[in-house]
Image: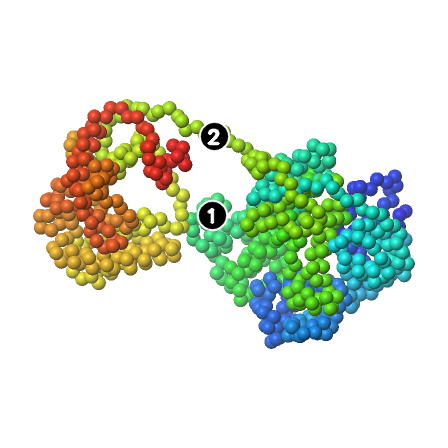
C-alpha cells in the first residue's frame, strides 16, 4: 500500500495527476488539495466554522463603534455587504503570514495610516471577541486557536507538497511541525518571478537557482533532486484590433493543434479575463469547448425571466414591455403586488415558494433554493428595507453564481489559477495585455507598499510576480503556445511578453480570421430587370404626398402605392419629432373644435395646456417634451389673440376634402381653415422644418401641399391665401408662388392623365434615399 500523501494546489490538478498515472498497482498515492490538507492538520475543539454570510453579519455587528465611520465604509447592510470583502482580505493576509495586527503600528514608521490601523485593530478585537463568545471559527483566527493533528501526519510515510505558487508563514509552520513525524518534501520550480518564495526557502537554508526544478527535503534542509527546465521555443503571438477576432484565433489554433496530432483533451484555452468566456461560448456552435468556470447564472431562463420582470416593474418602457410579452406577465403581477412593500410586511419563504412555481429547470431551481436558504439568515437585518432593495441584493447573489458546463467539449477553457500544476500539450492564451497580465490586486487598500515591506507582508509587486510565475510555468510545461492580445488606443500587449522573450508575429490578415466566425454571404445583386407595368391615374384620388412621391422617385411610388408595402416602425421610448407634432396638432384641434376664437390670452393658454396634457404620453420624457412645447407656444398664444382681434376665427380643423381638378380627383386633410367675413385662409401647422420655394426653383418643385389645400378649400368661400403656420417661430409664412405653382401642378396632372404605362425606375439623386424606408429593398443602403 502506498502510504504517502501528495498535496496539489487544486482539484483539477488532482484529476490531471490521476489521469496521467499509469501504474500496475491498485494502490495509488493519496492526493489532496492544499486547503483540505491544512484543514486535516488543524483541530479546533468546541468551535464550528462560520459561513460567508454569517461572518459578514458578525463583522457588521463588530463595526458598531463611532470611529469606524472614518474608514469611509457605510454601515448600512447593502453597502457594508459589498465592502466587507476588502476588510476580510486584509485580515486573512495578516492571519496567513502570522503577523499580529498590533504590530502594524510599529511598521507604520511615518504614521501615514495611524488612524486606519487603530480602527482596524479595534474592529479585529471586537470581531474576535464575538466569534469566541459564540464559539464560531473564522479562518482568520485559525493560527491562534488550532491544535496540531499529529495522529493524521503519523500515518504518512512521506508528504509531498507540489508547490506551484507561494507558501504562507502559517503553512510553513504546519509543515515544520509535520517534519517531527514524517518526511516532508517540497517539489517546486524556481523562476525569476517566484523570488518571494525563494527568499523564504533561503532563510530555511535552501539556495535555489532560477530555471531549475527541485525536490527539497524539509526535515534535513537537503536538496534531493535538481533538474534544468527546458525552455519552450514554439510560441506564436498575434495582435488584433477587436476582442471578437480573438475568438476566431482560438478556433483557428485549436484546428491547427489537432491537425498536428495533439489530443483535444490536452489542449487548453486560458482566459486572463474570464468575462470573455460568454463571447467564446456564443461562437462554440460545435460544442468543442468545456468551460471550467461554468456558465454564468445570468444566462439561465430563471434569472432572465426574473430580471426582465423586475426591469418592467422598475421602468415602464417599450423595451421592458417587449420583455414582458416574451416572458409572460403572471410573474409580473405577483412581484408587482409586493414590490414596494417593506420586507417586514411579507413572508419571505412563502413568497419565494410562489416564485418557484414559474420555473422547472432542476439545476437552476437548486441554485435558487440554495440562495433563498442562505438569504433567510440575512432577513433580520433587512426588515426596514423595501422588497425592491431585497431583490436588488438577491439578484446580485444569483448573478455571481454559475451553472456547471455539461456540454462535454474536450478542449477546456479556464482561468490561470486553474492551470497550476497541470500540464498541456498545447495552450492558447488570449487578452495578454497590460490590463489583464498581470491583473492588479485590490488587497493594498489599507497599507502602502513601504509598510508592507517593513512588515514583510506580500506587496502588489510580489502578487504580480506570482501571477507571472503561473504564466511562465504554464508556458514552459506546454509543447506549443499561442498568445493573442488586442492592440488599440485603449489596449496594448503586456510588458510581460518582453520579459518572456516573446515577440509579435502576425501571420494572417484580420479578414482571414473574421471569415472563420462569419460565413461570407454572396453579395446581393440589385441589378434586377426594369419594373415596367401598365398603370393609370384616372381613377386615383391624388394627394400632395402621393404626387410628391411619384415626382421624387417612381420606385418608391411602386413599393408604397402599387405593392402597398408600408413602413414598420419599432416602438421607441424616445418620442420622435413628428409624434410631438401630432400631440400639438391634436391639442389645437381639441381647443378649436370647442371654441372658434379667443379674446383672452390666459384662457387660450389654459385650454391649450389642458389639451396638450390630455394627449401627452405617460413617460417622463413625453411630459418633459410637452412641457417644452407649452413654453414655446406662449408666443403663439399672443399671435393667435392678435389674429382673432383682426376678425379671423377658426372655421374648420383637421378636415378631409375631395374636389375635382383638371380631370382628376384631388384629396387632402387640411390642418386649419380660418374665416373672416367672406374671406378664407388655409393654414398648415409646422412644428418642424419645411421647404420654401424661390423664383429659381419653383418650376422644379415636387411638394404642392399648400396648392392642394388652396384648391380643396375653394368651395368654402373666397380663398385669400395659403400659408404655413410656423409654431416654433409663431409666424404665418404664405406661399410666395401660389399661382405659379398651381400652373405647374396643372401641367403635372395633365401628364398623369396621359400615363398608360410606367417604368418604375429608381431616382437618380441618391440623397433622396438617405432617409427612405425602401432604401434596403432598392440596394441604396
Q: Residue at x 43, y 28 (%)?
A: 525
Q: Residue at x 85, y 45 (%)?
A: 28
Q: Is residue 59 visible?
A: yes
Label 1: few (<14), some (14–19) or many (≥20) C-alpha neighbours in 10 Å: many
Rendered location of residue 107, percent (x, y): 72, 72
Distance from disc 1 to disc 2, alpha carbons, whole Å, reads 37 Å
Label 2: few (<14), some (14–19) or many (≥20) C-alpha neighbours in 10 Å: few
Q: Residue at x 16, y 42 (%)?
A: 738
Residue 289, compared with residue 316, is above or below; it is above
Q: Is residue 39 visible?
A: no
Is label 2 in a helix, a strand or a loop? Answer: loop
Residue 266, compared with residue 376, is above or below; it is above
Asked if residue 113 lies left or right of residue 780, the reply is: right
Q: Residue at x 61, y 73 (%)?
A: 68
* Quarter of image, res 249: top right
Asked if residue 491 lies left or right of residue 14, the reply is: left
* Quarter of image, res 79: bottom right
Task: Kindly identify which numbered label has been placed on residue 482.
Answer: none
**Tag 1 residue:** 324
**Which of the two residues, 564 or 467, is positioned nearer the viewer here?**
467
Rendered location of residue 166, percent (x, y): 76, 57
Instruction: Pick whichever of labels 1 and 2 is earlier in the sequence.
Output: 1
**Tag 2 residue:** 523
**Which of the two residues, 219 or 128, is positioned nearer the viewer here?**
219
Rendered location of residue 9, percent (x, y): 76, 52
Amino acid at each position: 500500500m502506498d502510504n504517502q500523501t501528495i498535496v496539489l494546489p487544486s482539484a483539477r490538478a488532482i484529476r490531471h495527476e490521476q489521469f496521467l498515472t499509469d501504474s500496475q498497482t491498485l494502490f495509488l498515492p493519496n492526493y489532496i488539495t492544499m486547503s483540505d490538507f491544512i484543514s486535516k492538520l488543524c483541530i479546533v475543539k468546541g468551535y464550528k466554522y462560520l459561513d460567508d454570510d454569517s461572518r459578514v453579519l458578525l463583522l457588521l455587528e463588530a463595526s458598531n463603534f463611532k470611529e469606524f465611520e472614518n474608514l469611509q465604509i457605510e454601515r448600512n447592510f447593502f453597502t457594508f455587504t459589498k465592502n466587507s470583502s476588502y476588510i476580510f482580505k486584509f485580515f486573512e493576509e495578516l492571519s496567513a503570514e502570522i503577523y499580529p495586527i498590533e504590530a502594524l503600528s510599529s511598521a507604520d514608521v511615518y504614521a501615514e495610516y495611524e488612524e486606519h490601523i487603530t480602527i482596524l485593530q479595534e474592529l479585529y478585537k471586537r470581531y474576535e471577541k464575538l466569534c469566541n463568545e459564540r464559539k464560531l471559527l473564522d479562518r482568520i483566527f485559525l493560527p491562534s486557536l488550532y491544535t496540531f493533528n499529529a495522529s493524521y501526519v503519523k500515518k504518512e510515510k512521506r508528504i509531498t507538497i507540489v508547490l506551484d505558487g507561494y507558501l504562507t508563514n502559517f503553512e510553513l509552520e504546519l509543515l515544520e511541525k509535520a517534519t517531527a513525524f514524517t518526511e516532508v518534501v517540497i517539489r517546486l520550480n524556481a523562476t525569476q518571478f517566484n523570488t518571494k518564495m525563494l527568499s523564504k526557502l533561503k532563510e530555511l537554508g535552501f539556495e535555489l537557482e532560477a530555471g531549475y526544478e527541485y525536490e527539497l527535503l524539509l526535515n534535513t534542509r537537503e536538496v534531493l533532486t535538481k533538474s534544468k527546465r527546458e525552455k519552450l521555443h514554439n510560441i506564436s503571438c498575434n495582435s488584433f484590433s477587436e476582442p471578437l477576432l480573438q475568438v476566431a484565433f482560438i478556433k483557428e489554433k485549436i484546428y491547427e493543434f489537432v491537425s498536428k496530432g495533439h489530443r483535444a483533451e490536452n489542449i487548453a484555452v486560458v482566459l486572463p479575463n474570464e468575462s470573455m468566456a460568454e463571447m467564446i461560448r456564443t461562437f462554440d456552435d460545435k460544442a468543442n469547448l468545456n468551460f471550467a468556470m461554468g456558465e454564468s447564472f445570468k444566462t439561465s431562463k430563471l434569472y432572465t425571466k426574473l430580471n426582465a420582470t423586475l426591469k418592467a416593474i422598475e421602468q415602464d418602457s417599450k423595451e421592458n414591455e417587449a420583455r414582458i410579452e416574451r416572458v409572460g406577465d403572471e410573474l409580473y403581477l405577483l412581484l408587482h403586488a409586493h414590490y414596494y412593500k417593506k420586507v417586514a410586511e411579507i413572508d419571505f419563504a412563502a413568497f419565494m415558494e410562489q416564485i418557484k412555481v414559474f420555473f422547472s429547470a432542476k439545476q437552476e431551481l437548486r441554485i435558487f433554493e440554495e440562495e433563498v436558504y442562505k438569504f433567510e439568515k440575512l432577513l433580520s437585518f433587512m426588515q426596514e428595507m423595501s422588497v425592491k432593495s431585497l431583490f436588488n441584493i438577491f439578484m446580485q447573489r444569483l448573478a455571481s453564481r454559475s451553472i456547471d458546463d455539461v456540454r462535454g467539449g474536450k478542449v477546456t477553457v479556464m482561468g490561470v489559477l486553474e492551470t497550476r500544476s497541470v500540464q498541456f500539450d498545447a495552450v492558447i492564451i488570449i487578452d495578454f495585455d497590460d490590463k489583464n497580465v498581470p491583473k492588479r490586486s485590490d488587497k493594498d487598500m489599507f497599507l502602502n507598499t513601504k509598510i508592507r515591506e517593513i512588515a514583510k507582508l506580500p506587496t502588489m509587486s510580489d502578487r504580480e510576480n506570482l501571477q507571472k510565475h503561473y504564466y511562465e510555468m504554464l508556458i514552459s510545461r506546454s509543447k506549443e503556445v499561442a498568445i493573442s492580445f488586442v492592440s488599440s488606443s485603449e489596449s496594448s500587449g503586456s510588458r510581460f511578453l518582453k520579459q518572456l522573450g516573446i515577440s509579435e508575429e502576425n501571420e494572417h490578415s484580420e479578414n482571414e480570421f473574421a471569415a472563420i466566425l462569419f460565413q461570407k454571404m454572396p453579395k446581393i445583386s440589385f441589378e434586377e430587370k426594369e419594373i415596367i407595368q401598365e398603370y393609370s391615374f384616372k381613377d386615383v384620388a391624388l394627394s400632395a404626398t402621393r404626387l410628391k412621391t411619384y415626382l421624387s422617385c417612381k420606385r418608391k411610388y411602386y413599393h408604397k402605392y402599387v405593392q402597398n408595402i408600408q413602413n414598420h416602425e419599432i416602438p421607441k421610448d424616445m418620442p420622435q419629432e413628428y409624434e410631438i407634432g401630432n400631440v400639438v396638432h391634436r391639442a389645437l384641434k381639441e381647443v378649436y373644435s370647442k371654441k372658434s376664437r379667443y379674446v383672452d390670452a390666459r384662457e387660450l393658454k389654459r385650454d391649450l395646456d389642458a389639451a396638450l396634457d390630455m394627449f401627452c404620453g405617460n413617460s417622463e420624457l413625453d411630459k418633459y417634451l410637452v412641457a417644452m412645447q407649452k413654453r414655446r407656444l406662449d408666443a403663439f398664444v399672443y399671435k393667435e389673440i392678435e389674429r382673432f382681434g383682426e376678425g379671423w376665427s377658426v372655421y374648420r380643423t383637421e378636415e378631409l376634402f375631395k374636389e375635382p381638378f383638371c380631370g382628376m380627383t384631388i384629396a387632402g386633410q387640411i390642418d386649419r381653415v380660418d374665416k373672416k367675413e367672406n374671406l378664407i385662409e388655409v393654414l398648415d401647422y409646422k412644428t418642424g422644418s419645411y421647404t420654401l420655394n424661390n423664383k429659381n426653383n419653383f418650376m422644379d418643385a415636387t411638394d404642392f401641399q399648400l396648392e392642394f389645400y388652396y384648391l380643396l378649400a375653394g368651395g368654402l368661400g373666397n380663398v385669400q391665401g395659403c400659408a404655413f403656420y410656423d409654431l416654433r417661430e409663431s409666424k404665418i409664412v404664405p406661399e410666395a408662388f401660389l399661382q405659379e405653382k398651381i400652373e405647374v401642378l396643372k401641367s403635372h396632372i395633365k401628364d398623369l392623365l396621359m400615363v398608360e404605362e410606367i417604368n418604375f425606375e429608381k431616382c437618380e439623386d441618391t440623397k433622396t434615399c438617405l432617409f427612405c424606408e425602401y432604401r434596403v429593398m432598392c440596394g441604396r443602403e
